[in-house]
Amino acid sequence: MINVGVIGYGYWGPNLVRNFSEAKETQVVAVSDLSQERLALAQRRYPAIEVSTDHRDIFADSRIDAVAVATPVSSHYELAMGALKAGKHVLIEKPLTESSEQAIRLVDEADRRNLVLMVDHTFVYTGAVRKMQDLVASGELGDIYYYDSVRVNLGLFQHDVNVIWDLAVHDLSIMEYILPLQPHTVSATGVSHVAGQPENIAYLTLFFDSDLIAHIHVNWLAPVKLRSTLIGGSKKMIVYDDLQPSEKVKVYNKGITVNNGAESRYQMLIGYRTGDMWAPHLSVTEALQAEVQHFARCLDKGETPVTDGHAGLRVVRILEAATRSMAAKGQPVELNQMRVIA
Ligand SMILES: NC(=O)c1ccc[n+]([C@@H]2O[C@H](COP(=O)([O-])OP(=O)(O)OC[C@H]3O[C@@H](n4cnc5c(N)ncnc54)[C@H](O)[C@@H]3O)[C@@H](O)[C@H]2O)c1
């Protein structure tokens, strides 16, 4: 049995506590939160769990093998580093850290101590995203041409992070899991409609070493909730609508054929191919349950998590570059050099 301590029992922390408590491989022995009220709630729901307002009690508890961190991103680095230094494995909320420099330090520390560092990129553990990864990896879609995503609603305005760090982080973690290539450059634009507050609407474009292009639109100020993604391939295309209760993923056998046989390029003929649409069967296991079981297996068998510290770092690098590009009114920023391309 893996003993877990959870730091942060606000909005998301209770989901972690519930899933760690329900999994047969893990149990929650302690929860820490700065708020006595939140701790009282945790104790009412789980009377056997110990609670504390001081996270250091979790680090000092020798029964605890792993720590889950579900606090605001500004405290992720300090808490995760403290847990690793106390010899605990770590599951940490997205985004991994506030900067790539912090993320690199955590990855190094976990590697040096041979501890598991896993980031909660929740969507990667959903049946829909797993299926899309299968379809792309098996070549069913052909060459991938584009990834186009919209994630908007009348959302909670965050004060410490902009909409890219809050919402685009989900699309970036899905993309980095599904697509065969990593982007090399990002361009982002966005604005804030509340004076002195972070940007609440943003558009990101990502460029790759091929004609693959990705676009992500995120917005806290939309009248309706949309969570939809198009993935276009040379053979087939996917429409993924996360708000559908079933058939979230639809695969369309549609595309174009290009007739290059014409005498000049002005005569090039585009043909349209339309075939069947099908909705693959998707696992309905709760993402966090699958994730908690994966985390437990990684601890037990020494496996590397699908969403390890490196995956968290790759996403943080894009978030950082996008924020820099947005400040430079959309100037492309190279991910390797992290410099604005004039
Ligand atoms: N994976 C997902 O889909 C998902 C969804 C929502 C939030 N999150 C992530 O979860 C994290 C928390 O978000 P939230 O919405 O639950 O925030 P929240 O503000 O509702 O809760 C955070 C809690 O952490 C506590 N806290 C802060 N510092 C602490 C410390 N040093 N020790 C103990 N407790 C401390 C606060 O008292 C608060 O109760 C963020 O990183 C966020 O990005 C992930």
Image (cartoon, rainbow, N blue to C red):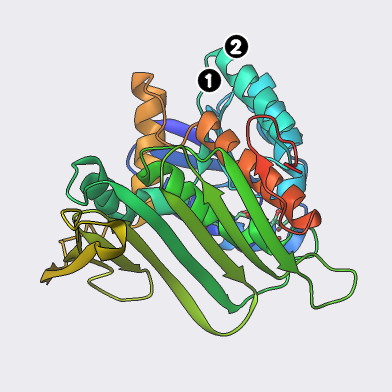
Question: Comparing marks 1 and 2, which lies closer to the viewer?
Answer: 2
On screen, residue 307 above or below 213: above
On screen, residue 122 above or below 200: above
Residue at x 54% of width, y 50% of height: 206
- The residue that mark 1 highlights is 115
Which quadrant would residue 69 be assigned to in this image?
top right
- The answer to the question of whether label 1 and label 2 lie on touching residues, with beta carbons closer than 8 A, is no
Residue at x 45% of width, y 43% of height: 176
Check disc 1 and give the amino acid type: Leu
Farthest residue toward the right?
196
Position of 252 with respect to 51 (left or right) is left
Residue density around tag 2, few if under 14, some if 14–19, many if 20 or more, within 10 Å = few
Q: Can residue 48 be seen in this snapshot?
A: no
On screen, residue 13 above or below 66: below
Residue at x 67% of width, y 34% of height: 58
In the image, the residue with mark 1 has its CB under 8 Å from the nearest atom of ligand 1: no
- Which quadrant is the N terminus positioned in? top left
Check disc 2 and give the amino acid type: Arg
Residue density around tag 1, few if under 14, some if 14–19, many if 20 or more, within 10 Å = many
The percent position of residue 186, horizontal first and vertical second, equals: 61, 47
Farthest residue toward the front?
263
Q: Nearer the viewer, residue 47 or 8?
A: 8
- The residue that mark 2 highlights is 112
The percent position of residue 296, horizontal first and vertical second, equals: 39, 33
Residue at x 20% of width, y 56% of height: 263
Q: Can residue 26 be seen in this snapshot?
A: yes
Q: Quadrant of ligand 1?
A: bottom right
Q: CA distance from mark 1 to mark 2?
A: 8 Å
In the image, the residue with mark 2 has its CB under 8 Å from the nearest atom of ligand 1: no
The percent position of residue 66, horizontal first and vertical second, equals: 54, 31
Q: Nearer the viewer, residue 284 or 328?
A: 328
Which quadrant would residue 274 be assigned to in this image?
bottom left
